[in-house]
Image: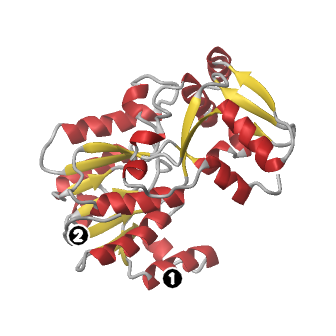
Amino acid sequence: MTESTTPSPQSILVLGAGELGLPVLRNLARVAKRSPGSTISVLLRASTIDSQVPEKKADIDELRRLGVHMVAADLVNDSIEQLAEVFAPFDTVIGCAGMVAGRETPMKLATAALKSGIKRYFPWQFGVDFEVIGRGSPQDLFDAQLDVRELLRAQDKTEWVIISTGMFTSFLFEPVFEVVDFENGAVNALGSLDTSVTLTTPGDIGKLTAEIVFFEPRLRNEIVYLSGDTLTYGQVASLLERVLGRPFKRNVWTVPHLMQELEKDPTHHIKKYRAVFAQGRGVAWPKAGTFNEQQTIQVTTAEQWARENLANE
């Protein structure tokens, strides 16, 4: 991919270094070299930065080798004012902390970002298209994400970019999600066999996010769509048969069935997600119009991911 101009240098702060934060940081460190003078920092708890737990220490050591600066703060316990002060020296803040901290955190972070006066904010919205899904969906956490979008759109001081990625590819195959039942050789299609889902790996999201951050002409106040793959649950069953060389039964879990299951257990997060994905709105989009296709950037298809990760299933 070629840009006509050298991107302006940016000081970037990434919130979190987990499943998505690490790939984003690795790729930002790489792409930032195209824009001399750029700096990459990560916000973590002081206890994480100083951790002697081998896995955490290995991640911190890797980030230091990449030239990533450490910033100590606590997204959950620090106040909006404290976080705004931490964000203020940066041009760009990218939320990669997920929603593990609870329903209120996305709005808290967005409010701190606006208060800080940064130039551009990428909220944690790496997932489905919340507006197409709409308010009052089975997954109530999504309403909190719509609140963030309204807040960002209602002001004009801080630019924003939302990156819609669909589901993390690996999650579709997680036993806890129960769409793929390896033991019984079955795919439990959400909604119907023709319902589609968009999948992107965290590695590809990291690679594409880094390109989006430094892209010229600068992306601002828009939703950018990514897709590693967009396929139906029927196609998921077929790809598993090709990859694993054994038959997979095709069951359908209808929307009424999944809503009934949720009614019995209304706080069950996975059941909320299953019901939303079964409805098929805002959870899939054609690969053709996505940023990665427009920029001809190679991404991992569901079948490639399966061949690399499911050989022993």
The residue shown at (65%, 54%) is 305
* Mark closest to the chain's N terminus, 2 or 1: 2
| Disc on res. 61 | 1
- The answer to whether 277 appears left or right of 71 in the picture is right
* Quadrant position of the N terminus in the picture: bottom left
Relative depth, front residue between 197 and 53: 197
The local secondary structure at tag 2 comes to loop
Q: Position of residue 121 (x, y in %)?
A: 27, 54
Q: Position of residue 19 (x, y in %)?
A: 54, 60
Relative depth, front residue between 127 and 192: 192
Q: Position of residue 34 (x, y in %)?
A: 29, 75
Relative height, residue 254 to residue 55 (above, below) = above
Amino acid under disc 2? Gln
The image's colouring method is: secondary structure
The residue shown at (30%, 60%) is 213
Quarter of the rendering containing residue 186: top right
Quarter of the rendering containing residue 71: bottom left
Relative height, residue 277 to residue 22 (above, below) = above
What residue is pinned by disc 2? 10
The local secondary structure at tag 1 comes to helix
Q: Position of residue 297 (x, y in %)?
A: 44, 58
Q: CA distance from mark 2 to mark 1?
A: 23 Å
Q: Pick out the residue farthest to the bottom.
A: 65
Quarter of the rendering containing residue 84: bottom left
Dots 2, 1 in contact, CB < 8 A: no
Relative depth, front residue between 185 and 302: 302
Amino acid under disc 1? Asp
Q: Residues within 10 Å of mark 1 (few under 14, many from 20)?
A: some
Relative height, residue 272 to residue 153 (above, below) = above
**Count of numbered circles on the image:** 2
Q: Nearer the viewer, mark 2 or mark 1?
A: 2
